[in-house]
Amino acid sequence: MGSTHSAVERRLGALGKLKKKGKWIPHKLSNFDLERRVDMSLQLLTLHPNFNWLDHMATSDEKWVLYENHHRRAQWVDADKQPEDVIKQELHPKKILLSFWWSVHGVLYWELLPEGKTITADYYSSQLQKVKTKLKTSPLHGHRVHYLHDNARSHTAKTTKSLLATFHWTVLAHPPYSPDLAPSDYHLFSDMHRSLEGQDFKTKSEIEKWVKKYFDSKQPEFWRKGIESLPTKWQTVVDKGGHYV
């Protein structure tokens, strides 16, 4: 149209427009996805007259832990000095899978899988058996457990569902593509990711020591906050018509 890019920007500014980037979202949600998120959030909001049952809730997830956790950040240096170089992350970095279960009372059970191992329905079922044993010595013992996990294939497999049915746990609804409704994703992962920045591990044993130290460093309030923020998350999803929190 004969106008320069800068002229267009000036005109947009004169109209009160601001240049902003859209936020990253986990998934492009269809109308059906939005409806499911609202329906499941309403179901959880009305599950019981109050939210005391959150004290008896267990949740689980998995996280890849990298052996080398490089992080590029601004550095304060003298004007005539150059900042230290940061090694670019490899395309396929060496990593190991961490599985963990937790509640408002803290960590229930965790393990690092053997190198190269991923979660299958059979393996996940064997982990659940270990978790059930751990619950006997936890504050959740004697209460009906409300269990929240995501929709990973190993979690929704027939083998897993059949096993959970024998536990007599209440398995909570969790809509697909909803990390904003999973305490591990919106609360624990972000904090753990920040703590991992700059950490370089040589062996699985070093990662195990770090993970144990990390979990031990968390105060009781940290775990409780992650779980007790769920009702607010559910309500926000309902108020926003299913869109991401």
Image (cartoon, rainbow, N blue to C red):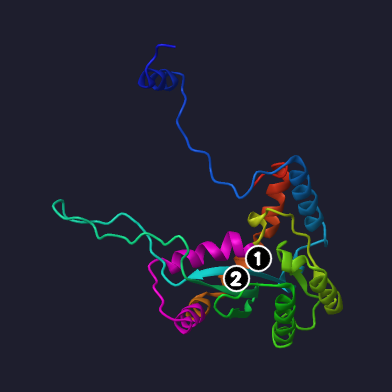
Quick check: 83 left or right of 224? left
Q: Residue at x 53, y 39 (%)?
A: 22
The answer to whether residue 214 is above or below residue 38 is: below
Q: Residue 220 lies in what quarter of the image?
A: bottom right
Instruction: Write the start and end of the magenta stretch as one range.
Output: 183-212
Q: Is residue 84 magenta?
A: no
Q: List x then y, in percent, for residue 206.
A: 44, 82
For the stretch drawn in magenta, what is the main secondary structure? helix
Q: Are marks 2 and 1 in contact (CB under 8 Å)?
A: yes
User: Mark 1: which secondary structure?
Assistant: helix
Q: Amino acid at mark 1?
A: Ile
Q: Residue at x 48, y 64 (%)?
A: 193
Q: List x then y, in percent, for residue 53.
A: 77, 69
Dot 1 crowding, Cα within 10 Å, few <14, some 14–19, many 20+ = many
Give the quarter of the figure containing the N terminus.
top left
Instruction: Tell me, yes or no, if residue 124 can be seen here.
Output: yes
Q: Is residue 210 magenta?
A: yes
**Looking at the image, which is closer to me, 57 or 93?**
93
Dot 2 crowding, Cα within 10 Å, few <14, some 14–19, many 20+ = some
Mark 2 = which residue? 223
Q: Residue furthest top?
A: 2
Instruction: Tell me, yes or no, if residue 148 can be seen here.
Output: no
| Cα–Cα span, label 2 and label 1 | 7 Å
Q: List x then y, in percent, for residue 131.
A: 71, 81
User: Mark 2: which secondary structure?
Assistant: helix
Say the numbered circle drawn on residue 218: none
Mark 1 = which residue? 227
The answer to whether residue 221 is above or below residue 25 is: below
